[in-house]
Image: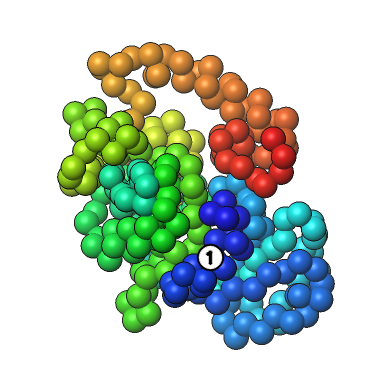
Amino acid sequence: MLHNKLAYQRALVDRGFDTLKFMELAGPDDVAKLDFTTPFAIKQAYSRGSQTIYKAHPGDDLSYLEFDPTNPWIAQEWLEGDRYCTYSVCRDGEVYAHATYPVDYAIDGKSCLTFEHVDHEGILEWTRELVKSVNFTGHMGLDFIDHPERGLYTIECNPRGTSGIMMFTREQRVDRAFFGENTELITPPPGRTTMIGAGMLLFGWKKDAYPDNTFKKFWAKMRSSKDVIIDPLDRKPAAMMPLAYAGIMRQARKYGVGVDGGFMHDHEWDGRPI
């Protein structure tokens, strides 16, 4: 339910959460019934890292869509606003660790490369309500839009490990949250910016990585952020990076996707039998 972007929106409606307008597109007949009056996103119910998202407008020709009976498309209202991502560790419907971070430097504006925790009480309470309503155990990430007039909406849910876990420090022992051992909510320290250094070098300098991006802005962010891979107390992850990226490149070639798609391919489910 949470993996499937369409089923997730329907589950929110069933539980009384406000959602952006959405419609299932299982075939050309559904496309003909579209009644959006504002721009909308089109993506498949299962899509790794939302690699294929189209922004459409009312009246657009959508004949390019190819339909898969096991993986329908979802049309979802396109709402502008402040964008946030979260990462939460949950057990038996309770949140034991939580991070909220605004979308900053990101691959094509989607997959974040830099991370800084912010306190957003509304997002934390929204997450707690969802986790309780489905009695969730595990870790999950949510993508939010915070509109100044309409409030909070989640775009989609990623019920798996996400990059947000890299925001916590060794001393915080976020591992305790997986077993419900901590009594106080674990959150990343404020004012600490981390980054995926290799990802920033590959994508962070590009124009679409950040609004009005310049090399000066990119380099300033690189210098002010801590690389999550390089750690003087644990050097092996950094030493193994060449092998890890070689594996990502093999995945990308095997499945005919970009480097970012190759990175996502082995740890996000696309709805097909494993």
Position in image of residue 179 (x %, y %): 32, 34
Q: Is residue 69 left or right of residue 182?
A: right
Q: Secondary structure at mark 1?
A: helix
Position in image of residue 157 (x %, y %): 49, 55
Observer-nearest of 198 and 127? 127
Identify the residue shown where x is 55% and y is 61%. 8
Q: Quadrant of the C terminus?
A: top right
Q: Is residue 70 left or right of residue 241?
A: right
Q: Amino acid at mark 1?
A: Ala
The residue that mark 1 highlights is 11
Position in image of residue 35 (x %, y %): 66, 84
- Residue 262 makes an appearance in the image: yes
Q: Is residue 225 left or right of residue 3?
A: left
Position in image of residue 161 (x %, y %): 45, 39
Identify the coloring: rainbow
Q: Is residue 202 above or below residue 71?
A: above
Q: Quadrant of the N terminus?
A: bottom right
Check disc 1: other Cα within 10 Å, few if <14, some if 14-19, many if 20+. Answer: some
Identify the residue shown where x is 76% and y is 75%. 30
